[in-house]
Amino acid sequence: MEPSVVMRKYQLFISLLIILFFLNIPLYFENIRGVGISTSKWVVLFFFLTLPLINKSTLNNVYRNEFLRYYCLFLWVITVFFILEGADTQNLEYMKKFFFRFLFVISLCIVFTSSYFSCKQFKLMLLIAVFFNIGSYIVELFYPFLFVPVSHDSANPGRSAGFYVDSNQAGGALVLGVIMTISSIVKRFRLVLVCFAAMAIFLTFSRSSILIYSIVAAIFFLQSEINQKQSVLIFVLILITGGFLYSDGLIYLEELLDVGDKNNIRTIMIRMESFFSPSTLDDSGLERLMVAELAYELFSQNPFFGVGFGASRELGVDVSTHNMFLFMGLEFGLLGVLLHVFFIMTLFLGMKRAGCHRAYLIPVFIFYWSFFSHNIYDEFHQLIVYAFCGAGLLGAQRRGVYG
């Protein structure tokens, strides 16, 4: 067997590992099942497995990856603030997490710029992962404790999340997956993916995910990425189905759960009502609003340099800011906010230069998601997508990165 054939098969194996990270499986087994090796060890193992893919050309391309350049800058900033703040135990653990994410980004850049990397093959694998997520969210509706046991603190019956555990993260991962893979499907079948993904995202009851997916689907419709005539018919069917779910679906869901968790059903009902009455907030929404107000107040007291490294974890509540702009401002001041804006603009301009005709979709997602999550630089599925986009900056038209 020729060396190139062996390396291409090895590259396929590495791509499969990336898909496992995209599905959040290593983190799931560590945090929920308590089995297997830690996620940090998975990252180190993945890094060493990518080393055989390195050659002179790969090193040059890795250096040119703009997402890696940005992440280096981001890591340098947080390291400076970490040193200034002091190395207590919590901050040290916090810093270690970002170091391992940085190592993961380096590994991704090596893979995506390797001469053995097949973009078409990887997108096909990612498409399979997207349909796997869709299936797992639907199955979880009927078996609410299949992924997270009822005794676990993270159990959230009634809201599908699959291996992601967190429903908002699960919805966001599916939105990104659809954006990245829709061009891999023949146009007449794309509506199938869009509709099944819409149903799965709805089952997460994540307001942020449902709203951003509605925007993405509307863009697909306006740009004729999907069949427009069929889309209108499907939209009418979705409205009819939505009316059924609102009137009778939650009653069925309550009977299906049958664990005495009435409060969770009430929360889901409030979440649905909030689409028609934005002022309606559940306990989670009220808590996030309170934290956001507190974070903004602290940031306004010291806007130039922020409160300090790790400040978002010391707000006196169990949740963080759920807002990337507030997170960066609170910990790093205006520098942090500008740094995040710089990341969005760099990604957009770079993808546009590369000839991606949907260059704005990923940056639009990041900008929107930044108002609902503070984990933009932390979640594996997001890092994979951004590193993939960074690799696309090297020649999207030549390699067909975005279809």
Image (spheres, rainbow, N blue to C red):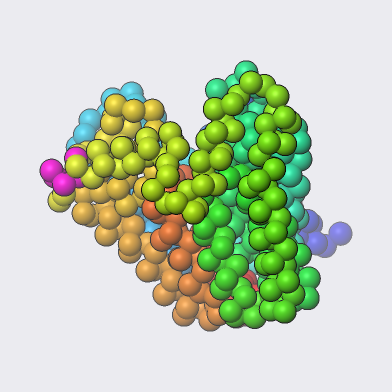
Q: Is residue 20 above or below residue 92?
A: below
Give the quarter of the figure containing the C terminus: bottom right
Residue 35 in view (yes/no): no
Q: Which residues are magenta?
A: 298-302
Label tally? 0
How far from the left and from the top, in percent, is residue 79? 29, 42
Q: Is residue 401 left or right of residue 341?
A: right
Q: Is residue 352 above or below residue 56?
A: below
Tell me which residue sits at (64%, 80%) in the image.
Answer: 224
Tell me which residue sits at (52%, 59%) in the image.
Answer: 212
How far from the left and from the top, in percent, is residue 353? 46, 80
Q: Is residue 170 above or below residue 188?
A: above
Asked if residue 237 lies in the magenta stretch, the reply is no
How far from the left and from the top, in percent, is residue 70? 38, 59
Q: Is residue 262 left or right of residue 75?
A: right
How far from the left and from the top, in percent, is residue 367? 41, 61
Q: Is residue 390 left or right of residue 143?
A: left
Tell me which residue sits at (78%, 71%) in the image.
Answer: 189
Q: Residue furthest right?
A: 1
Q: Residue furthest left?
A: 301
Dividing the picture into quarters, in which one does residue 258 lie?
top right
